[in-house]
Amino acid sequence: MITELGQRISIDARIVPLIGFGSLLRAHIELSEISLAELAMKIPCDLSYLYRIRLGRYIPNHDFTRAISRALALTPQDEEVLLLAARPPSLRSNLERCEAFGRLLRDLRKRRGVTQSELARALEYDQSLLSKIERGKRSPPKRGFSDNLITELDLSEDEIKQLLSYQ
């Protein structure tokens, strides 16, 4: 999805919403060889706010995204991709999102012939939590959960896109 080309990040704009702003920001920071603290001083902004953005907890507004772009000296094309990633996710209800994610998770797990307890053990989660997620009673966990799920279930590129669309 994200490949290093010199100091550029090349991605297909159609999958930007699936990647997430935080992941894209992490990649740009890594390529820029700048610390998060240095970036916070360049913008300027509070380091803890920038940290939360990098973790994907917050999505910055348009002006702040442009400030990040300037501080990282991004190309106009990379700035446009970053601005695209900063757009708010679709306004789908949380309940529908939870139920759809749970159905997908159950389907992926069953297609692989893995039991709920086996997957929970491999992911180092409690089986009751995994059960709640599959039944749509619990929100899809943060990015780390999906990354581990992708690895444990050896998901295809299409399955990964589908899974990440709920985040």
Image: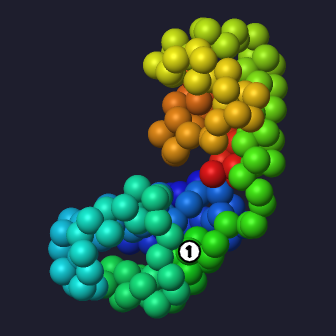
Q: Residue at x 52, y 44 (%)?
A: 142
Image-quadrant location for residue 137: top right
Above/below status of 94 relative to 67: above
Residue type indicated by callout 1: Ala
Quadrant position of the N terminus in the picture:
bottom right
Q: x and y percent of residue 66 in the render? A: 44, 88
Mark 1 = which residue? Answer: 86
- Above or below — where is 110 with respect to 94? above
The answer to whether 38 appears left or right of 107 in the picture is left
Q: Whole-percent x and y of residue 52?
A: 37, 61
Percent x, y of residue 10: 55, 67
Residue at the image point whose x is 80% and y is 41% from the top: 100
Numbered marks: total: 1
Question: In the depicted view, which residue is nearer to us: 20 or 61?
Answer: 61
Residue 31: in sight, yes or no?
no
Quadrant of the rendered image containing residue 113: top right
